[in-house]
Image (spheres, rainbow, N blue to C red):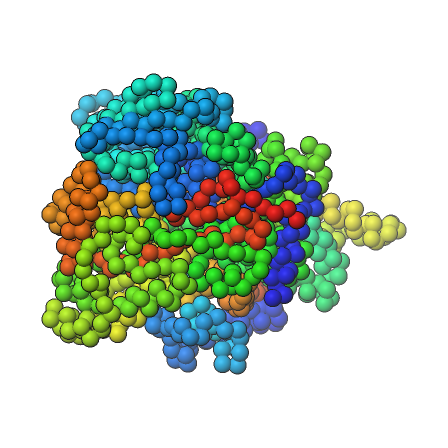
Amino acid sequence: MRRLLRNRSGMLGLGIVIIFVVMTLLAPVLRPYNAATDRNLALRLKPPSTEHLMGTDELGRDVLTRVWHGGRVSLSVAVLVVAGSAVLGTLLGVLAGLTGGWLDMVLSWFVDILLAFPGILLAITIVATLGATLSNALIAISIMGIPGYFRVMRSSVLGLRDLEFVQAATALGSSRFRVAFRHILPNGLSPLIVQVTVDLGRTVLTIAALGFLGLGAQPPTPEWGLMIKSGYSQFLNAPWLSIAPGFAIYLSVLGFNLLGDAIRDVLDPQLRG
Amino acid sequence: MNRAKRMIALLLAAFLGIAAAQVPGSTLIVGMTTLPNTIDSADANDSGSIGVTRQIVDRLVELGETELGPGLALRWEATEDSTAWTFYLREGVSFHDGTPFNAEAVKFSLDRWNDRSNPYHFASDGKAYVGWRNLFGGFLNDGSALDEVTVVDEYTVKLDLNRSISFLPSLLAAGYFGFDSPAAVMAAGANYGTPSVGSVGTGPYRFEQWQEGSRLVLRANPDYWGGAPQTEQIVFVGVGDQTARLAQLKAGAIDIASDLAPSDLPSINADPNIEAILGSGGLNTSYLAMHQNQPPFDNVLVRRAVAHAIDRQAIVDAFYAGQAVLARDIIPTVLWGHGDYEAYAYDPKLSRELLTQAGYPDGFSTELWFRSSGLEPVIAEVIASYLADVGIQAAVKTEDWASYLANYMAGNFPMYTLGWNADFPDPDTFVYTFYGPPAVRRFGLERPDVVALVERAREVPSQEERQALYARALTEIHDEVPMLTLAHESKFLVVRTGVEGVVMNPLGGFPRLNNATKATN
Amino acid sequence: MNTYILRRVLGTIPVLLGVTFLVFAVNRIIPSNPAVAILGDKGTVEAQEQLAEELGLNKPVFLDLQGYRATGELKALFDSQYVAYMRDLLTGDLGRSFMTRAPVVDSLRVRFPATMELAFFAIIIGAGLGVLLGVVAALNRSTWVDTTMLFIAVSGVSFPVFWTAIILIYVFSVNLGWFPPAGRLAVTSTIEPITGMHVLDALLRGQFNLALSALHHLVLPAFALGTNAMALIMRMTRSSMLEVLQRDYMRTAKSKGLMPRVVVLKHALRNALLPIVTVAGLSFGALLSGAILIEAIFNWPGIGSWVYNAITQRDYPIIQGGILFVAGVFVVLNLLVDLSYVLIDPRIRY
């Protein structure tokens, strides 16, 4: 822990993340917003000014407010997505590692199939089938993240399974699953934490990418990727529409990545890239 | 506009190129929203595809500025009851592959479109011939009005119908019915009209190359029967974004741009390098529909309340820059067949009274769905504000086109906006499409008496009788208010100054470019 | 060793089969009729039903249990959409697009090289810049140069790739005018396809100015696409080089009196090459994924935009053919990377 505190870039990352989380939580308090009723056709496409620090968009809405509330959307969805992937992936991975045999083969096969889809292609296919909404995007990106956790936990289990203390516990009569939860999981925790921090940044990017393609959040929800997309068609006369939300994405992902790298350096120096 | 200058510089640099591009004779570059889906004209059902095929193939009958005129058929005559038509074809015309155009060629194509068992119909390969089905009623022995095509002599062909269609020439002027070379179709099989094969017709331009996703190239046909085209080559490119299309036109990267926004007209008129080619009257209608499966729109008082709540004239004035007229009913003002009644006036007070009468003194909540393209997003917002003024809280929503289609057709939308473009210059394409059998699906409207009127109007031989039938149907519909018609929009093109000879097509689709020229700099 | 290779190669087959399964299931299990989207607003209910019938969409998706029970024949069990598709697939027939009725294979022949060319140049830029910056970072370890490089590396994976593209267009295309904002070539230029990759084809035909134009159009999209890979490769290069530089034999070589710079560049880099190649190969997947976004912005007629449009239009044959093809390429690439790892590094035992 002390080593973490000494890692400067990690602290920077932590700082950024904390700022984002705080701002996200405070958003409805400091600057309440109702996306459905927000429109002011008289103030369309105004460049940044003292009144509107990031300008206004094609419906006259204040960009800064929308970027701020967009943070709520991105961060809350990202947390849910990572939680979903982590829980499912861990369960399946531990299961595969412990039971072995044909269940392991089948689960690994399924995960390999998911991995055969490069990047967001899988998410796009799922969302297009289920319908383009933010909740479906959530499901799709969650599924996309499962293989990562599956592999990490499975190899963790495989590595620990044959260690003495585990064998001792089994010999003493604990069921396999109790063994898993009480002994293996805590020791497999560090690669899990590393995976989570890496995943958070990547998830925010994917949410934005789906929003940009029109397959995630739908208007009038203030989602960063969607804002970049709507802003792009006005790019020549109103570039601020796309620049602001993009910068927000960059900063938040940067925070997660810096923090994640620092945690990884501390917990598992072997994995250092 | 410093940015515009930079755009001009960079696009010209790319255009003229480090690459010494071979620009033969002269070339016109056309920027459309998207490249065609197919250039088999009968199989096409989108305006992009029809626009390109219009350069390659000819129809039997062509629509001039206001009237029908000869195309590949010089003249035609019908029996008294309009159930048998004879077409006298133009002689001495050849397809681009050298094969002759004659009655056999006409029969080949008509049979191919009409008969599902024809070896060149290719239904199992996905060709659906939507245009033929809608305009002729179906296919051979399954709803089609066309029973048989007879080759009387080399340049005379006879069409036998199983019902009276007095406006058959109008039908045949539709963009779908361009005639292809039988030899080319037989050689290409189901691949006819795809990028690797193209299409072969009798038109002013012949197909040269189609790089899918990039561009489609046509070359002038010097032997065209209507006179050799002035421009040697036409290149079609797809620029999906409307703003980008205008920007490229301003920068000179493209010469002609289609589907630009009316709100850009002031900026277009102010720019000396480009000019707008305006149309004369739009054969299209945009509308706000209310589905009667979704309460409270099953109550006619509520629908009338909506009709009075919206200031349609203000919308037309605000968003179309003078390029649209208020739609009194579904038929465009330039066509005949209108009903005789007062259009719904903007009267919010009356609207509130009607709502109270209907049992909604405090209004109600509903959804208003719109397509996420063109003016619909903004207009939907404006309509929602008008509705809010009388107490109707309408949440505006949109989704992708494929889902939108499925949902509106399934009756899942209480209110939705859409539009319709005429396929051919006759009221039938409007009235039948909306108040004929499809009315049930579109609005949940069950008026078999109106459907009967509309179907009868297809079969009656004289235009006066048809006019009377349509007028009656529309007057009946007027009181029902299944939808609120909004505007007839005059489509326009924008060209670089120096491009001459481009005239808008009355049907609204992309016009023929056989007379277009470009001043060489 | 050979059994390992064989096992790995054969192991890709069930994975690819699984991909066809998954794509099929995801597309066709949901009860929506693509004929609605195909026929558009002009489609009537009869037309939609008839087209669905013609396209075989009314058949059961995977197995025809009803038909089997009715006739008792095993053959009837397999009268399904999936079996029909796989049968065609084995003969190389990927079907026809629902929207355009053009054979999927024909489109692939145009679309795939476009994306490959883009990905190839993205990797070159990414690897080139990545190695360069990584070497600089490694040589200047723990100085401000190193910190800056590391920051660039983290930033490189933190930027949304579509935003990078937009910013690049704005700065280098709209404002500075150095590069074109879209397309593979100028509108009036043509390169007769041999491989479908414009630079290669133009060079093969001796049309050097066209090759140059194609390259000119490639710079911005390839750079945008490659920033992610660049960041990863830079870090990998840096850490590999650091590791190698510290090894004993390096110190021995140094002490033998060889010039430090020469030592670095020749020995260190060569030894550090393996993990760099690995990362490059593995980045390819991210490239294919980013290609969808880049192609949309630059109007690039590649597989990404093709499959994406097909997905929004419910054009199943393109979705299936495109995804299967891309997954196939991806799986093969991963396989090659894995195998090369085994072949090159004798320390790894299987």
C264 or B251: which is nearer to us?
B251
Residue C212 shows in the view: yes
In the rendered image, the vertical position of residue A268 relative to residue C88, given as above or below: below
The residue at 52%/29% (across/down) is: B223
C103 or A251: which is nearer to us?
C103
Q: Position of residue A15 (x, y in %)?
A: 54, 73
The residue at 22%/42% (across/down) is: B463
In the rendered image, the vertical position of residue C54 relative to residue A51, given as above or below: above
Q: Position of residue B295 (x, y in %)?
A: 16, 61
Residue A90 lies left or right of residue C286; in this view the side is left
Q: Position of residue C312 (x, y in %)?
A: 39, 47
Q: Quadrant of the C terminus of chain C?
A: top right
Residue A271 shows in the view: no
Residue B464 figure quarter: top left
In the rendered image, the vertical position of residue A245 relative to residue B82, given as above or below: below
Q: Quadrant of the N terminus of chain C?
A: top right
Residue B428 lies left or right of residue C112; in this view the side is left
The residue at 33%/60% (across/down) is: B325
What residue occupies the far top of the structure in this picture?
A: B153
Residue A83 figure quarter: bottom left
Count of residue discs? 0
Q: Position of residue A224 (x, y in %)?
A: 46, 64
The residue at 17%/44% (across/down) is: B465
B405 or B486: which is nearer to us?
B486
